[in-house]
Amino acid sequence: MATTPDNTASPASALKALRHCTLFAILLAASGTALAEPTPAPPLANASAPNTTTPAPASAPANPHPHTIVFIHGMFMTPAAWDSWQSYFQQQGYTTLAPAWPLHGAAVAQQQAAPAAGLGALTLDDVVESYREVLKQLPDKPIVIGHSMGGLVAQKLLAEGLAAEAVAIDSAPPSGLIVLDWSFLRSNWAVVSPFASAGEPYTQTPSSFRYAFANCLPDDEATAIFQQYIVPESRRVGRGTSAPVAKIDFSQPHGPLLLIAGGDDHIIPADLNRKNFERYSDAGSVTDFRQFDGRCHTLTVDRQWRDVADYVKGWLGRH
């Protein structure tokens, strides 16, 4: 796999550069990674997470009217990350789809060997538009479930009225939201640095992946996920969160929305997800927040992924 040096900066140098960067707002970007587990894992007990607006159900009721779920992956990965989730929700009676982003449809090994031609030019606008086209072809409005940058896309599609409900997991923030946590700045630096070429695709190194996405996992699990699922990505997608495509009118009515955070997430800190949740202000719309303490950016696909899927299933069953 071709790699790019892990350009980490000290807190002082990073903040100094950011003060002079006209693209300061791009720090809102999240290098989204929904990573597929190397082997199926047995179900584990639901994670404890006291910081939530709605309690997890003891058992999720069966959905008498199955819906279609469209899964949206994030940066640095492919639809393969949703394989376990698709099987899980199909068993609950849902029809599922997991379309690839543009230039992300090839096998993981092929993408690892060489980035797709034109990948460096891919933008967040391109990604959002590709999902708009998918949803417009469906007979009914679906549920959308996205992770990281896919979570932002899910929020956008819900705001545009193209989706009936949305779940945004470890979501990249809409335009205008930011936190100054050092882990957030460091994890996103390689994508948003003004010293990096915007048109050159970026490939995570094992160390950058370990810090940003898998900081809560054992070394062997983190290594296996990195080797099997991580692909090069366009910096322009990450920088797109400062563009108009990432704007959301939080005051407008919308379908039911659940935002989920990992309490130990480095690249998208939980306080950023909570700030995102708190911006929604329409009293007549359902907007819920759930934090899984002790979990990091891989919470959709690590060995406890089913805890999150169980909670999402229960939430969907109530809305």
Image (cartoon, grey):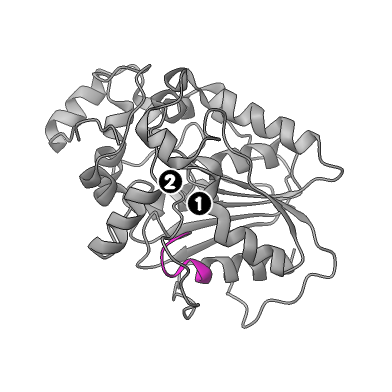
Residue 40 lies in the magenta stretch: no
Q: Is residue 77 left or right of residue 56?
A: left
Residue 14 image position (x, y, % from top left): 19, 30
* Residue at position x 73%, y 35% in the image: 134
Picture coordinates of residue 178 (x, y %)?
39, 38
Q: Residue at x 36, y 20 (%)?
A: 23
Q: Would residue 252 appear left or right of 49 to someone viewing this image?
A: right
**What x and y, as percent, mark residue 276?**
50, 46
Label 1: which residue? 81
Question: The C terminus appears in which quarter of the rendering?
Answer: bottom right
Looking at the rendered structure, the kind of residue marked 1 is: Ala
> In this rendering, does residue 30 appear at all?
no
Residue 189 visible from this viewpoint: yes
Q: Is disc 1 placed on a helix, strand or loop?
A: helix
Cβ atoms at labels 2 and 1 below 8 Å apart: yes
Q: For numbered disc 2, what is the local secondary structure?
A: loop
Q: Amino acid at mark 2?
A: Thr
Magenta highlight range:
301-307
Residue 188, by quadrant, is top left
| In this rendering, position of residue 163 left or right of residue 118 | right
Please name the residue shown 41% across and 40% down the image. Answer: 109
In the rendered structure, which disc, 2 or 1, sits on the residue that comes first in sequence?
2
Q: Quadrant of residue 222?
A: bottom left
Of circles 2 and 1, which is in front? 1
Which of the image's four quarters has the N terminus? top left
Q: How many marks?
A: 2
Relative side of 2 to 280, left or right: left
Q: Which mark is residue 33?
A: 2
Q: Nearer the viewer, residue 106 or 95?
A: 106
